Amino acid sequence: MSRSRLLLLAAAAVAACWAGGAAAQSPYPSRPVTLIVPFPAGGGVDAVARIVAEKMSAGLGQQVIIDNRGGVAGVIGMRVAAKAAPDGYTIVMSHTGITSINPTLYANPGYDVLKEFTPIGLIATTPIVLMTNRTFPVHTVGDLIALAKREPGKLNVGTPPPGTGSYLSAELFKAAAGIDFTIITYKGTGPLTNDLLGGHVPIAFNVLAPAMGNLQAGTLRAIATAGPARLVLLPDVPTIAESGLPGFEAVLHYGLMAPAGTPAETIARLNKELRATLDSPEVKARIVADGGEPLPSTPEQYAADIAREEPKWSALIRKLGLRVD
């Protein structure tokens, strides 16, 4: 990401919080707020969004309504959000794939994070998990690598759409392990989890939230996690890095954004309620239960997070030669 584009994103966040804007005609919010979730219901992004929306509704005094606009790794939902009125009544759930991966992976994502959106704040971080159907005879990272080497390209591995962190984790895994397998992409983590349960795809790189209940019930099996350390919820599951691929790490950051031009005082109010939501013991517990870790921030800190993450993922995309038209 160029210096000028980084400055543009940071400036948008600062301006949204501190620059003077037109005074609202009535106290904000005076009606329900729509939260666009650019992925199908039942997936990891949707799970985090619903946890936050429920608590923020109480703080704002108006309902935060979830509007799932899934498709093309978040591209469709982001395009819709970019065209929304910048009045605080439409906000969007974002994550690393949307802010730091899609702009490089897609030839024309149809939205510009830096020009068309203003950060509200971060929500949480969550790792990606390598998991299998319980009947699949692969129990370790070593088993997976050995199988893929015996039958190059024949093994099907499920992921959410191209552009998601889970998808890129699969590509990174292939490159790091020196193996080849066929990636089967799904519209979201919910459909992926369902097909993994049904045995239609034997193994997947997936986020934890939609699969946690099945992992605990034993209908799915976690082989390894892609975070820097083992998860509290899965203490017996090793990281990929400690399973033979040192340095391997892939985590997702979730946050809220608003259309560029949203009034400063509105962004400040939304950030205040988001931070209060994340400070709630109930919300903290629910995020942790889904395998995440709360990550409250200011709008400026979210802008800085995007600035850090984008170069890392874009460099990987270019190295692997990935491009989606």
Image (cartoon, grey):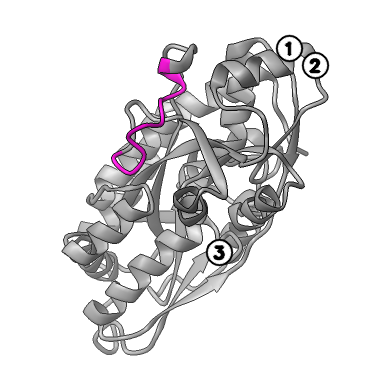
Tag 3 or tag 2, which sits nearer the N-term?
3
Q: Are marks 2 and 3 in contact (CB under 8 Å)?
A: no
Q: Which mark is residue 15?
A: none
Could you say where residue 5 lies in the image, as x and y percent from the top left?
44, 35
Could you say where residue 272 lies in the image, as x and y percent from the top left?
19, 65
The rendered magenta stretch, by its main secondary structure, is classed as: loop
Instruction: Give the labeled residue for mark 2.
Output: 152
Q: Residue at x 32, y 35 (%)?
A: 235
Of residues 253 and 75, which is closer to you in this image? 253
Of residues 14 and 254, which is closer to you in this image? 254
CA gap, disc 3 and disc 1 = 34 Å
Q: Visible in this render: residue 199?
A: yes
Could you say where residue 120 lies in the image, as x and y percent from the top left?
32, 58
Neighbour tally class for label 2: few under 14, some 14-19, many 20 plus, Cα within 10 Å: few
Q: Quadrant of residue 28?
A: bottom left
SS at mark 2 in the image: loop
Q: Quadrant of residue 261?
A: bottom left
Q: Residue at x 83, y 25 (%)?
A: 154
Neighbour tally class for label 3: few under 14, some 14-19, many 20 plus, Cα within 10 Å: some
CA gap, disc 2 and disc 3 = 33 Å
Of residues 155 and 16, which is closer to you in this image? 155
SS at mark 1 in the image: helix
Q: What amino acid type should be assigned to the residue bearing mark 3?
A: Gly
Q: What amino acid type should be assigned to the residue bearing mark 1?
A: Lys
In the image, residue 36 above or below residue 278:
below
Q: Is residue 155 left or right of residue 314?
A: right
Q: Are marks 1 and 2 in contact (CB under 8 Å)?
A: yes
Neighbour tally class for label 1: few under 14, some 14-19, many 20 plus, Cα within 10 Å: some
Instruction: Give the labeled residue for mark 3.
Output: 42
Which stretch is magenta?
232-242
Quadrant location, the C terminus? top right
SS at mark 3 in the image: loop
